[in-house]
Amino acid sequence: MTIHKLKNMFPKELVLQLDYHKTLPCPKVSAQDSHYSRKMRTNLLGIYCANEETIHCFLYDDSIGGAGPNEVISLLSNPLDKMETNYGRFNQLTIWCDNSPGQFKECFLFFYLDYLVKKDSF
């Protein structure tokens, strides 16, 4: 059996790894006057695509958004749309992430994944 026949037998699968980097307050200042002022926090969400062996990094501050499920859904839709445009429709989606309950284990992310299945994206 050739590799092309084997490739067609198995479903096309998209594998993603999601992780937020530790949120850091910026700028780091030691002056007493600014010590009690509110510092901006920067967020970095990395989405590693195993299919392409590339990482999509989304860096933003608190004025744009936090680090909750809404941001994960918004930022996850970008690579999903890009992959579908580049490679066509995938049959399966596998997402690996840590056990962060506020970001990845919220019901909103599961509702979004259910929505993708219902609109026949996967």
Image (cartoon, rainbow, N blue to C red):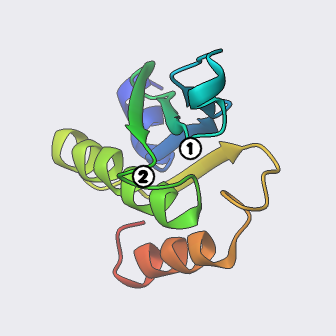
Give residue 104's quadrant in the image.
bottom right
> Residue placed at 59% from the left, 28% from the top?
33
Whether residues under marks 2 and 1 lie with C-beta atoms below 8 angstroms apart, the answer is no
| Mark sitting on residue 76 | 2
Q: Residue at x 48, y 26 (%)?
A: 1
Q: Position of residue 20 (x, y in %)?
A: 62, 37
Q: Where is residue 81 in the image (x, y as percent from the top left)?
A: 25, 53
Nearest-to-viewer mark from 2 and 1: 1
The three-letter code of the residue at mark 2 reads Leu
Q: Could you tell whether 86 is left or right of 110 in the image?
A: left
Q: Nearer the viewer, residue 50 or 46?
A: 46
Given the current orientation, which residue lies at the most extreme front position?
Answer: 33
Q: Which SS class for mark 2?
A: helix
Amino acid, disc 1: Arg
Judge whether 87 appears above or below 101 on screen: above
Mark 2 crowd level (few <14, some 14–19, many ≥20, 10 Å Cα): some
Mark 1 neighbour class, 10 Å CA radius: few under 14, some 14 to 19, many 20 or more: few
The label on residue 38 is: 1
Q: Describe the element under mark 1 as helix, strand or loop.
A: loop
- Report the front residue among 58 and 51: 58
Q: Would you say 110 lies left or right of 120 here?
A: right
Nearest to the observer: residue 28 or residue 74? 28
Residue visible at 61% across and 17% down?
A: 31
User: Does residue 107 appear left or right of residue 28 in this picture?
Assistant: right
| Front position in the image: 52 or 18 | 18
Image x and y of residue 27, in percent: 51, 22
What label does residue 120 carry, if any? Answer: none
Q: Earlier in the sequence, mark 2 or mark 1?
A: 1
Residue at the bottom extreme?
118
- The answer to whether 113 appears left or right of 2 in the picture is right
Q: In this view, does 15 lie above or below 62?
A: above
In percent of the image, x 57 and y 64: which residue is there?
Answer: 69
